[in-house]
C-alpha cells in the first residue's frame, strides 16, 4: 500500500487529502482518496500520479466527515474522475453510506470503518489491521489536556480505538504519528477520563 498526502504543501485552508494506491497498481486495486479537501490542485496531482494501466485514477472517495475543508472539492472530483463516494449516515452527496463496522477494500488492503462521533456526529476513522494504519480525519486522538471538553461518549470512542493495534495515525491536519499510535490513544483516553472525573461530567 502506498499513501500520498496531496495537500501537505497546500497554500489554502484545506484538510489533508490522502491518495491510497496498491503496491503494484494492479487491476483489482481500489484507488482511493481519503477526503477531497478544497484545494483544486488536487485534481492535477491525481492526474499526474501513476495509478495503473487501464485503471481509473480514483475508484472511490471516502469522507471522514462532511465539513467543508474535507469535502469542499467533492463536486469537482466527481466531474473529473466519477468515483463512488462513501460517507457516514445520510450525507446527501454520498453514493453509499456507512453505519460503522463495515469492511471496505482500499487499494490492496481491507479496512474497517469505525464510527467515532466527537468532532462531528458523522466522523469516522478508517483502520487497516494488517498494517496498523488509522486514518483519523478530525477525530482528536492526541489529547494532552481537555479541561472537561470531552464527555463519556468520547470515552467510548477512544475505548473502541485503543482496542485496535494502531501503529500509525494519519490525521486530517496534523503530521502523522508513526510507530506508537496505540500508546498515544491510550494516553489520551486516560487524560479524558481524568478530566471527566475532575470536572464531574
Image: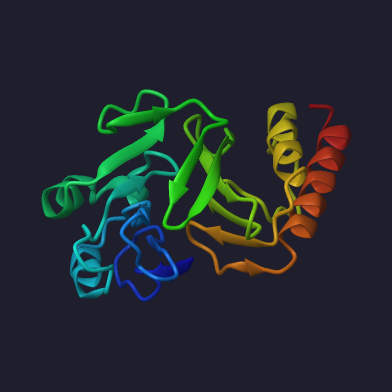
Q: Residue at x 71, y 60 (%)?
A: 181
| Residue 138 visible at all | no
Q: Is residue 129 left or right of residue 69?
A: right
Q: Pinpoint residue 133: horizontal percent, then vertical percent.
A: 60, 58
The outermost residue toward the front is: 27
What is the quadrant of residue 194 in the picture?
top right
7 above or below 172?
Answer: below
Q: Is residue 11 above or below residue 93?
A: below
**Image quarter in which the C terminus is found:** top right
**Looking at the image, which residue is at 45% across and 47% down?**
105
Seen in the image, is 29 located left or right of residue 189?
left
Residue at 26% in and 73% down:
49
Front residue of 73/51: it is: 51
Q: Position of residue 18 (x, y in %)?
A: 40, 61
Residue 155 visible to the viewer: yes
Q: Residue at x 72, y 40 (%)?
A: 158
Residue nearest the viewer, comparing 37 with 43: 43
Up-down relation of residue 15 to residue 45 (above or below): above
Amino acid at each position: 500500500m502506498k499513501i500520498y498526502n496531496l495537500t501537505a504543501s497546500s497554500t489554502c485552508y484545506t484538510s489533508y487529502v490522502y491518495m491510497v494506491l496498491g503496491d503494484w497498481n494492479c487491476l483489482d486495486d481500489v484507488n482511493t482518496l481519503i477526503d477531497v479537501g478544497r484545494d483544486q490542485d488536487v485534481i492535477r496531482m491525481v492526474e499526474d500520479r501513476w495509478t495503473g494501466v487501464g485503471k481509473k485514477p480514483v475508484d472511490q472517495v471516502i469522507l471522514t466527515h462532511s465539513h467543508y475543508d474535507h469535502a469542499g472539492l467533492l463536486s469537482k472530483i466527481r466531474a473529473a474522475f466519477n468515483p463512488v463516494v462513501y460517507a457516514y449516515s445520510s450525507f446527501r452527496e454520498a453514493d453509499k453510506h456507512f453505519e460503522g463496522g463495515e469492511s471496505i477494500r482500499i487499494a490492496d488492503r481491507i479496512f474497517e470503518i469505525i464510527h467515532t462521533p466527537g468532532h462531528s456526529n458523522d466522523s469516522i476513522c478508517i483502520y487497516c489491521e494488517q498494517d496498523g494504519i488509522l486514518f483519523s480525519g478530525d477525530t482528536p486522538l492526541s489529547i494532552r489536556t481537555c479541561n472537561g471538553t470531552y464527555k463519556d461518549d468520547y470515552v467510548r470512542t477512544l475505548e473502541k480505538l485503543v482496542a485496535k493495534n494502531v501503529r500509525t495515525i494519519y490525521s486530517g491536519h496534523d503530521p502523522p504519528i508513526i510507530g506508537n499510535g496505540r500508546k498515544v490513544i491510550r494516553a489520551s483516553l486516560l487524560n479524558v477520563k481524568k478530566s471527566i472525573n475532575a470536572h464531574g461530567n
